[in-house]
Image (cartoon, rainbow, N blue to C red):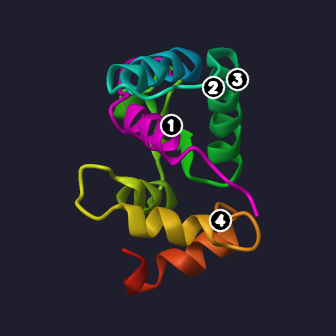
Amino acid sequence: MTKYNWDLMERLLHEVQNGAGKSFTPRPYAEQHAAEVAARGEAPGDLDHLKAVAGEYEKLLLKHDYIEPRTSEEGGTGSNYVLTARGSSLLSLLDSSIPGNDHPRTVLDEQEGDPLEPAVFDELASKAQIA
């Protein structure tokens, strides 16, 4: 059972979505995420670990086709990305601005294996009741 920091994952996907013309920098995004968590009065955890996790998430998102390099026509800089259809689907499941977003995160967490493994995720995302 693989567990993810869904709030951090959501943050990274939003940064990809809004990243035209700027480099994707997961470590500073992790710092900003930690600051936001602390501002809510919650413990953000070890910052160095969070930065390392953000870097690993970037690799995982690329490897499993959730993100891909942004073309120059889309504002690509050579070091930024665009969401794929799978990435957009993941972001819509994780989106904390949608009331009741805990259910999809719970379903993802309850998977036997890695919920972001493409075959597992695609099967889950195809089910209407997850959202």
Residue type of the residue flagged with mark 3: His
According to the picture, the residue beneath numbered tag 1 turns out to be 8
Quickly name the residue at label 4: 115
Residue 77, placed above or below residue 5: above
Quadrant of the rendering where the C terminus is positioned = bottom left
Q: Amino acid at mark 4?
A: Pro
Q: Is residue 53 above or below residue 79?
A: below
The residue pinned by badge 2 equals 50
Q: CA distance from mark 3 to mark 4?
A: 21 Å
Return the residue at label 3.
49
Q: What's drawn in magenta, residue-wise?
A: 1-24
User: Callout 1 environment at 10 Å: few (<14), some (14 to 19), or many (20+)?
Assistant: many
Identify which residue is drawn at 43% across, 78% down: 130
- The spot of residue 83 in percent (x, y) is 45, 47
Residue 29 numbered mark, or none: none
Q: Secondary structure at mark 4?
A: loop
Residues at marks 2 and 3 touching, judged by CB atoms closer than 8 Å: yes
**Residue 73 vs residue 5: left or right?**
left
Query: In the figure, 9 relative to 33: above or below?
Result: below
Compute the Cα span from label 3 to label 1: 12 Å
On the image, which quarter does residue 39 sit in?
A: top left
- Foreground residue, 9 or 126? 9
Q: Is residue 76 left or right of residue 5?
A: left
Is there any visible trace of residue 78 in the rendered image? no
Kind of residue at badge 2: Leu
Q: Which of the two discs, 2 and 4, labels the residue nearer the N terminus?
A: 2
* Labels 1 and 2 touching (C-beta < 8 A): yes
Residue sitting at 36 percent across and 34 percent down?
74
